Image: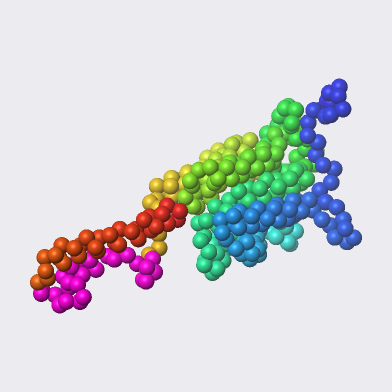
């Protein structure tokens, strides 16, 4: 593609390398991007969990179990849905550094394992899911930088100034249709997703601070928003994929999850507020049954059935009704904050 008269190219150039060496160790930018994303997610979640009164040290334990589960789940999803992209070596099914993680499988298995650990700790799972939702988007966005270095996750050909240059050998290995092989610049869908992930994370944080969202409403919006975006992205991508009725498999999955996330959020917000926990026995207000028993038994523990003086009978309900109303005021106040 031709360059303009200025110094800047009229497209996004591909990076010349995808890894670097530290002694005998070959460090892939793809893996490095995900490690940075995971670290950022842990830091963000710790801050958000501490802000709602949670123990931030729990976040490290959850990550210790959820991150490996996410990698395993992501690789399993990739191997099942795109077997044509598995490297032809004996360890091909495990080669996560070769751009082979499916976000749906990763989030699914990581969520299941994370919920198991949260319940082991006795933590409010709904509140924790809301704390982690924006952090997941930030991690995913940073991870997309790794796709840039791998020269993957690009869309259809384009002549837009921000088109991504893809070298010919990567067009061949990317499994794109032959009719697109002679084009050199393509839609940078990795960049679109990076921008969306950061923007939607900001929206979730704003909603959490400015709107009363019942947990795990923010996590449900994460599922809805990201899935809805992926419908758009899948309409642009031309890399190898399993197709069904003319559409990419991920298009169906993204559509189903977008609907599930939206319905889930709607049901969460319609759910009535949970009642405040019952007060301790020594501070519990008199119940209606206690008042009835008191009226029947009479003052000073007189046996039931014995008539009491009219003056005592008239004053007992009045004296009993006053304390029975007082404790309810702080009880209602606790319910508003809970």
- The x, y position of residue 245, in whole percent, is 52, 40
Magenta range: 279-306
- The x, y position of residue 134, in whole percent, is 60, 48
Locate the N terminus by quadrant. top right
Residues 151 and 4: in front is: 4
- What residue is rendered at 47% in x and 50% in y? 214
- What residue is rendered at 64% in x and 57% in y? 46
- The x, y position of residue 281, in whole percent, is 36, 71
Residue 314 in view: yes
In the displayed structure, 21 sits above or below 195; it is: below
In the displayed structure, 201 sits above or below 62; it is: above
Which residue, as the protein is rendered here, is positioned at the far top? 5
Locate the C terminus by quadrant. bottom left
- The x, y position of residue 333, in whole percent, is 41, 54
Residue 173 in view: no
Residues 22 and 303: in front is: 303
- The reply, left or right, for residue 299 in relation to residue 102 is left
The quadrant holding residue 198 is top right
- The reply, left or right, for residue 248 in relation to residue 170 is left
Residues 181 and 319: in front is: 319
């Amino acid at each position: 593609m031709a360059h303009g008269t200025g110094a800047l190219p009229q497209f996004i150039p591909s990076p010349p390398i995808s890894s670097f060496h530290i002694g005998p160790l070959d460090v892939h930018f793809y893996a490095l991007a995900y490690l940075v994303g995971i670290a950022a997610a842990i830091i963000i979640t710790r801050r958000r969990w501490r802000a709602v009164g949670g123990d931030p040290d729990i976040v490290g334990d959850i990550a210790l179990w959820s991150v490996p589960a996410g990698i395993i789940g992501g690789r399993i999803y990739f191997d099942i849905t795109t077997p044509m992209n598995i490297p032809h070596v004996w360890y091909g099914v495990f080669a996560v550094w070769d751009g082979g993680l499916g976000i749906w499988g990763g989030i699914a298995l990581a969520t299941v394992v994370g919920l198991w650990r949260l319940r082991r700790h006795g933590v409010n799972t709904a509140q924790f899911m809301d704390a982690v939702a924006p952090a997941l988007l930030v991690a995913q966005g940073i991870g997309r930088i790794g796709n840039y270095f791998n020269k993957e996750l690009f869309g259809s050909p384009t002549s837009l100034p921000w088109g991504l240059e893809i070298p010919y050998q990567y067009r061949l290995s990317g499994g794109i249709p032959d009719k697109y092989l002679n084009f050199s610049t393509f839609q940078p869908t990795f960049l679109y997703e990076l921008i969306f992930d950061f923007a939607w994370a900001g929206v979730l944080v704003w909603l959490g601070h400015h709107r009363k969202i019942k947990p795990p409403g923010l996590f449900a919006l994460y599922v809805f928003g990201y899935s809805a975006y992926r419908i758009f992205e899948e309409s642009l991508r031309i890399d190898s994929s399993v197709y069904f009725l003319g559409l990419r498999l991920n298009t169906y999955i993204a559509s189903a999850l977008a609907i599930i996330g939206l319905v889930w959020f709607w049901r969460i917000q319609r759910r009535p507020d949970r009642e405040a926990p019952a007060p301790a026995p020594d501070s519990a207000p008199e119940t209606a049954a206690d008042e009835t028993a008191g009226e029947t038994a009479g003052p000073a523990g007189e046996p039931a059935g014995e008539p009491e003086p009219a003056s005592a009978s008239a004053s007992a309900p009045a004296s009993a009704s006053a304390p029975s109303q007082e404790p309810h005021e702080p009880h209602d106040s606790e319910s508003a904050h809970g």
